Amino acid sequence: MEKQHLLEHLKKFLTPRRNNLFEEVLSKRTNFFTVVTQDVHQLHNTSAVIRSCDVFGIQNIHVIEEHQPRRIDKEIAMGAQKWIDVNRYNSTKECIATLRQKGYQIVATTPHGEAWDLEEFEISKPSAVFFGTEKDGLSEEVLKEADVRLKIPMQGFTESLNISVSASIILQSLTSRLRRSELPWQLTPEEKLEIEFNWTKKCIKNSEQLVEDYKASQ
Ligand SMILES: C[S@@+](CC[C@H](N)C(=O)[O-])C[C@H]1O[C@@H](n2cnc3c(N)ncnc32)[C@H](O)[C@@H]1O
């Protein structure tokens, strides 16, 4: 309740247009699907995936950096990382365990072998959708651990799609079907409050001071 009051206070420092936009975007956000990248080499690829998460309404992305440095390309994400929760891991094992604990099935995307075609993939379960590196794809560890494998059917000579292109195609399909379904895909009121609070704070220059002043005045 205190956070709700604090948010109402902070919202006075934003324009009505900005506050309405936050509410509109939040009403379309989901945690029903979440995205995971595993040791992606090219920063612009990770950043492009983050940007697609924002566009398709995925609130959380999980970035595994077991063999890659911890950097995200701000320019290419076009500021999208400001609106998305980026969860970082040093180990694939830890990431999988965390996501399973949150109730996600593990979905490995791959251009090879036995896998569900995207349009036939059953969307009824909360899913963490894993994407692999540019050269080698997902590790054996993820492919073995996965509950389901998923592929975008390809008709040409090329062996695979670029990772960020495949993330966009998959997210577009999954989220459009999800929003047409009766599944409980929307964020909870608690999640919405937390996210709107963080977004609002990020848009106000002296937000920390305003929060302190407000608390002191109560
Ligand atoms: C450039 S591909 C990796 C190619 C790699 N040689 C391999 O064997 O997987 C990078 C990532 O994009 C995704 N991807 C690419 N093409 C795909 C397809 N047709 N279906 C599903 N995912 C795909 C997968 O996550 C893959 O790990």
Image (spheres, helix red, strand yellow):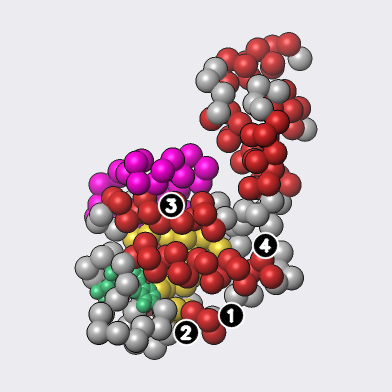
Distance from Cα at disc 4 to Cα at disc 3: 19 Å
Nearest-to-viewer mark from 4 and 3: 3
Ranked by sequence position, the earlier of labels 4 and 1 is: 1
Q: Which mark is residue 50?
A: 3
Q: Secondary structure at mark 3?
A: helix
Q: Which residue is mark 2?
A: 116
How would you rate the neighbour count of disc 4 (Cα within 10 Å): few for under 14, some for 14-19, many for 20 or more? Answer: some
Whether tag 2 and tag 1 are in contact, CB under 8 A, the answer is yes
Q: Residues within 10 Å of mark 3 (few under 14, many from 20)?
A: many
Residue 203, x across and y down, in percent: 55, 28
For label 4, the residue is: 185
Q: What is the x, y in percent for residue 118?
A: 49, 79
Circle 2 crowding by C-alpha within 10 Å: few under 14, some 14–19, many from 20: some
> Which residue is at the front of the view, 169 or 1?
169
Q: Which residue is mark 1?
A: 122
Kind of residue indicated by mark 4: Trp
Pick whichever of labels 2 and 1 is earlier in the sequence: 2
Magenta highlight range: 60-89
